[in-house]
Image (cartoon, grey):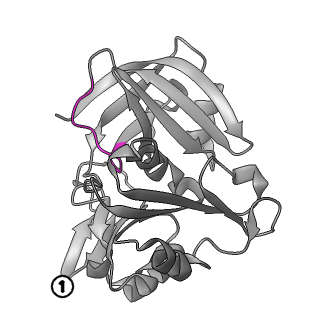
Amino acid sequence: MITKDSLKVLDVSSPAPQYVCLKLDAGKPLQGLLPGMFYELRAPSQKGRLFKPISILEVEESTLSFLIKVVGAGTQAFTQLKAGDRVEAIGPLGNGFPGIAGRRVLLVSGGAGYPPLAWIKRKSDVAGFCLHLHGCASADEAFPCDLLYTDDGSLGSKGLVTDSVDCLIAEHNIDLVFSCGPVPMLAKLTELCMQIEHYVSMEAYMACGIGVCHGCAIPVDKAFKLVCKDGPVFDATQIRWSEL
């Protein structure tokens, strides 16, 4: 059930130079949440301004964790929070990735698209096989994963996270791919995974998060769908990538 709450901040940390991690107390047991779902969050100093759509990084009993890339005033405000503060939250919102029990799964994240796939990786013991690739600009945006790719080669392999996907699919007999990140990365992955079940979590500007403003419409199948209400997780083959 979608609710609007004031959640207590339990912890604030900075795991990377451009990122802040928030741990919030939901005040009640959390059930039915899936990787890919998100919340609309707003720091108290931003009252009167728009909420920010943030993917869930982890759920533990009654606590929620979020990894947020700091890109403007709205997200910068989260870095000023301290334990005991309150954050306005609307959620949970959107759909989640399908189950992975018994599947041979490849997870591919890029930049700020890391959270939902990291959550899946932590719960991947039910999968037959699970490999998480993460791509980013430099070591400053690196997070725990199985294989890391950086644009500048400062950590992990130099290059794009999509560079070795076709080889890894063949080597590990992958039958399911999940991805989240920049549109060019997702579009390239879709080309590489045409014969494999592939789901993407789309990133989009969401003013409302509940399907009212229609600001996050994307071309899906023969129509347009809303990332916040119909997604953010979609069958990659249904998205008209050339129109994005």
Q: Residue furthest top?
A: 84
Q: Is residue 19 magenta?
A: no
Residue 86 showing in the rendered view: yes
* SS for dot 1: loop
Q: Is residue 153 left or right of residue 148?
A: right
Report the magenta residues as a range: 30-38
Tag 1: amino acid:
Lys
Q: Which residue appears at 20% of the width and 35% of the height?
A: 2
In the image, residue 208 lies at what x, y percent? 31, 48
Q: Is residue 4 above or below residue 151?
A: above
Q: Quadrant of the C terminus?
A: bottom left
Q: Which residue appears at 62% of the width and 36% of the height?
A: 20
Q: Which residue appears at 63% of the width and 50% of the height?
A: 71
In the image, residue 141 lies at what x, y percent? 70, 52
In the image, residue 107 lies at what x, y percent? 46, 61
In the image, residue 116 lies at what x, y percent? 43, 49
Secondary structure mostly seen in magenta is: loop
Write down the residue under mark 1: 222
Q: Is residue 201 above or below residue 223?
A: above
Residue 50 showing in the rendered view: no
Q: Nearer the viewer, residue 100 or 1?
A: 100
Q: Quadrant of the N terminus?
A: top left
